[in-house]
Image (cartoon, rainbow, N blue to C red):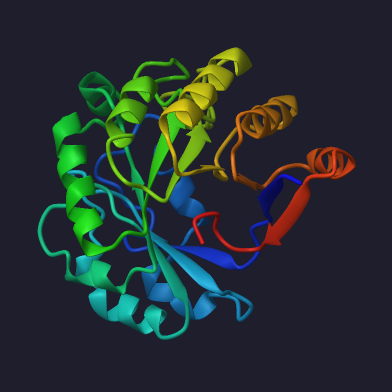
Amino acid sequence: MKEIKIVKLRSTVSVSVTGTVCQLNCKHCGRHYLEDMVPINRIDEIPPSTKSILVSGGSKKNGEVPLSEHKEEIESLKKRFRLNFHTGLIQDDISVLKLADAISFDFVGDDDVIKKVYNLNARVEDYVRSLEILMKITDRVYPHITIGLDCGKIGHEYKAIDILSRYELKKVVFLVFIPTPRTVFEKCQPPEIEEIKSVFSYAREKFKCELNLGCMYPKGNLRDQIAEAAVENGFNTLTQISEKMIDSLQKREFNLIFQDECCIF
């Protein structure tokens, strides 16, 4: 019986070390997703049922999320919760990363996409360098690839998979571009489902590790289609899928293992 982990996010809370500030103001995000995070100076608002924290935030102009500037607060969080760090590019002080139970690292496989989407003067080699630094700290580094990151167009994904497949990874997480209001890309469309299926198929062919469908992907009918595509391509974990999809998997006699924390745990 095929086993699939199903994540219903209830016990992981996102904390931003920069509040709603981001110096890059990326075209796909526009600081929008920072608004739903708990600011680092208000961690007393974290619900008591919380088990783990995604420590994230906006980026500096060099692509780094300034985690080290809040080491004291993060050390306080570590005493109570498991920590998943969303790092951005690695620049200077990395000592705070030794507190990580997991590291989520957005990986982009094309120089032009990095510059266009992130408004960032960086190259793929900078992402490779950061990945290798992180992998020296812990083997619990989980790259994230966003399909359609460039205004819904496919461009960097296959190259990202090719690069990452050279490394011994435990998990790779896939996300799908969401047109988000009040962003430069708000009128862009998500990739076509056949394009998403093709990327999933290529990923399963190239990676020996676990593959996760993360929490960020479009809602509506496309959401179920994406989840089904992940199942068809042997993904190990599905996050925030619909009850309809859960019922379908149960009828097909999949062994579903439910989890209430971030998919990388």
Q: Is residue 47 left or right of residue 210?
A: right
Q: Is residue 66 left or right of residue 93?
A: right
| Residue toward you, 5 or 55 | 5
What residue do we see at 47% from left, 78% from top? 81
How far from the left and from the top, in percent, is residue 60? 21, 49
How far from the left and from the top, in percent, is residue 99? 30, 74
Residue 71 lies in quadrant: bottom left
How far from the left and from the top, in percent, is residue 229? 65, 27
Q: Is residue 116 left or right of residue 140?
A: left
| Residue toward you, 16 or 242 | 242
| Residue toward you, 87 or 255 | 255
What residue do we see at 50% from left, 18% from top? 188
Q: Residue furthest left?
A: 92
What residue do we see at 20% from left, 67% from top? 68
Q: Is residue 113 above or below residue 52?
A: above
How far from the left and from the top, in percent, is residue 17? 33, 63
Q: Residue furthest right?
A: 251
Residue 117 lies in quadrant: top left
| Residue toward you, 88 or 227 | 227
Q: Is residue 189 visible?
A: no
Q: Is residue 125 above or below residue 138?
A: above
Q: Is residue 55 above or below residue 22?
A: below
Q: Is residue 195 visible?
A: yes
Residue 248 lies in quadrant: top right
Q: Residue furthest front?
A: 1
